[in-house]
Amino acid sequence: MSQAILERLKERYEDGVVETATERGDDCAVLKREILVDVCRFLKDDADFAMNLFVDVTAVDWLDRRTPRFDVVFQLKSITKRHRVTLKVRVDDGDDAWVPSVTGVWRGADWFERELWDMFGVRVDGHPNLRRILMWDGFEGHPLRKDYPVAGRQPLVPLRKSEVHVFENNPVDPFVVGLGVVREKSDGDA
Amino acid sequence: MATPETARDPLDVDDLPMEPMVLKMGPSHPTMHGVIELTLRLDGETVRAADVEIGYLHRGFEKMGEVSTWNQVFAYADRLNYNSPMLNELGYAMAVEKLMGVDVPERAQFLRVIASEISRICDHLTCVGAGAMELGAFTAFLYAVKAREFLYELLEKISGHRLTVNYMRVGGVWLDMPDGWDGAVRQALTDAAGVMREFHKLVTRHRIFFDRMEGVGIISQEDALAWGFTGPCLRSTGIDYDIRKAHPYSCYDRFDFDIPVGDKGDNYDRYLIRLEEIEQSRRIIEQAFDRMPGGPVVSSDPRVALPEKGPVYNTIESMMNHFKLVYDGIRVPPGAVYSFSEAANGELGFYIVADGTGKPYRVRVRGPVFAIMQALPQMLIGGMIADIVPTFDGINMIAGELDR
Amino acid sequence: MIRVREKYGDRMTALESSYLTETLKGLSITLRHFLENTLTRKNTVTLNYPEEKKPYPERFRGLHRLMKRDDGQVRCVACMCCATVCPAHCIKIEAGEHDDHRIEKFPIEFSIDWLRCVYCGLCVDACPCDAIRMDTGEHPKPQIDRNGFLTTKIDLMKLGGPSVAVQGGVRPDNGEG
Ligand code: SF4
Ligand code: SF4
């Protein structure tokens, strides 16, 4: 069945499909970035394929081994038809490291795409809220890139000062002020 | 106690009569199962907007995987969903076996299924037990933990540890089951079922519990699919999708079991589904013991299996093979596969890429909870603060597989 | 496919929603357990730890021990298999040359950081001469500082006994020259 998906994609998108492969039962189509969203929408809406479940998106960093540098790998699945397919988009480093967002097709791609950006630094164009997700704001670099050192350390986020001054600026509520005094004391002790 | 209305209209926070209150729940909060931070905007007690901040338990599983040998990853995989380590190991082992084309002996398949199903029961027990506790039923929680304890002892007997089992290997399992283990399993399952009957009597039809679960945290079928739900959360909306049935792996196609589904997609459905899955897992385990074949428990493929100790001590060939496997690790031919299995919370996927050396080039985990958690705001908005607790529990968030 | 709502009931019946019957039912269960557990201790599952202890099962992977040869020397030949396979990198071995040419190598120092160890048991599997085992049935005891968990060869050998595994012993002339 999934073979048929590859055939159909080749037929429909001709040049857009760079290559197709079947490896150990996984059917995979390598696409050009421009048609990605279109293909996704087609696979989802077409009654024969009905890829209604977005499973995963991730990337593989080939650093010096291959160009373009990243394979962005999508896993899609149909719950009704019980088949699945893998889509790949190859993107390069630097300015070229971006893929269009498929959140418009499956809302569930949201966090996965944020993770893609966070971990690999592959920008997701058109994503509604592209923030880091597992790392904190202010983290430098993208940890799953092969050139990020395994034992890489980054300065920790400095400890926040106790929130006493917030209370001081707002001395309206005696209860809150009281709280502030208490906290100040315990901070001094420590 | 009132059941809140769960209208899902997109709420405009700005039209509130007064300034909304911002409340932070977490990252470490008694009702939070794991470390996760919820930022809520409240209108009175009604949640109007929510944001989820994750990553507090990020341990770099995927990066660690790239510098470990294929077998060492098992030790990390245990800690993904720490309630059901066997299921993670099964998922990972299947991925590597798929890439290498290793056949797993029958008996090992059966042992894997039994161990996994025990783990699944443990996971569900934790979920329903903790859920009851967070709604005030502490006794019920202790009962669930008691039942779980019986099962943990089984895992300890077969694998040596309760949580960090490290039982499976590429191509099979570590050791055959100890003598008398099957009897112990049957006994423990009966005991646990007895305890669960009491648990069931204590909470399932209790008014307080019912009112707080029923109609709370509703998600529709379309939304659940769009967000990428799998597992009990997807089944609660009425879709009978279970990977064990839809894409049978290991030897699940030989067992007779049913998939429980809900109707409304609310917390009560999710709770009942977990109760019922415990029953079904029990059925699978009993059938597996009835049909357990004999034979070896680890593949004889010299590429993956450490040779027997006897020959290693005495013959040079086995000794060399042993050293090769220990020093270089298992050599997996170059390639990439995606392999998936039904973990306690849904589809646990492993996308692994090998470059022909003894270490994975890339190990990607698709934790089931990751997809489900992104819908949490949607499930909370419109409800009350107090509803956060049961909804959060119904999802059964496990920070280990969420943050990896 | 099982519809859970059909099996377990959908709505509350009038009796159930009265709150009283279910509560009494629950109370009767807890009361029964309470009486059972106070009058007899037959069905209690809890233990009075640490006075009562539950033995660990046979396969429990506890503290490591280093096995000895018949003459009491360490059995380990410092082949580094365990240190290589360890996912936590917690085994440190310093190898030295042995006077006996049949043994060749032995560990001058062998230390395991029990605080870093994840008790996975891979080192035991990897050892080609049954020199390291984890069957002491003990878990690491609390220590006052981290260094307390850094065990030395002496400690590990104290836990060990002579290994009975036959090794290199099939031919009577084995190892002679
Ligand atoms: S049990 Fe595992 S972590 Fe501990 S020393 Fe052995 S190999 Fe290392
Ligand atoms: S594997 Fe065994 S013989 Fe080799 S260094 Fe470790 S304990 Fe010694």
Image (cartoon, coloured by chain):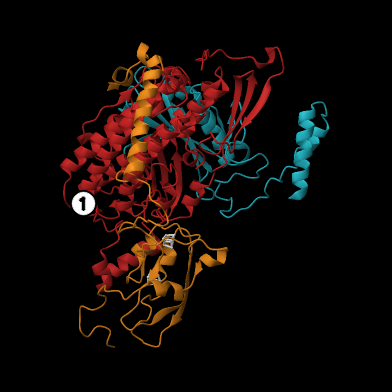
Chain colours: A cyan, B red, C orange
State which quadrant residue A141 falls in. Answer: top right
Classed neighbour count for the residue bearing mark 1: other residues with Cα under 10 Å, few (<14), some (14–19), many (≥20) = few
Q: Secondary structure at mark 1?
A: loop
Q: Quadrant of the N terminus of chain A?
A: top left
Question: Which chain's residue wears label 1?
Answer: B
Residue occupied by mark 1: B180
Residue appearing at x 53%, y 67% in the figure: C148
Q: Is residue B76 above or below residue C73?
A: above
Q: Nearer the viewer, residue B33 or B354?
A: B33
Q: Quadrant of ligand 1?
A: bottom left
Q: Nearer the viewer, residue B235 or C25?
A: C25
Q: Which residue occupies 75% across, 40% down?
A: A183
| Quarter-of-image position of residue C60 | bottom left
Residue at mark 1: C-beta within 8 A of ligand 1: no
In-front residue for pair B36/C149: C149
What is the tally of numbered marks visible in this picture?
1
Q: Amino acid at mark 1?
A: Gly
Image spot of residue B244 (x, y percent): 29, 33
Rendered view: C132 above or below C29: below
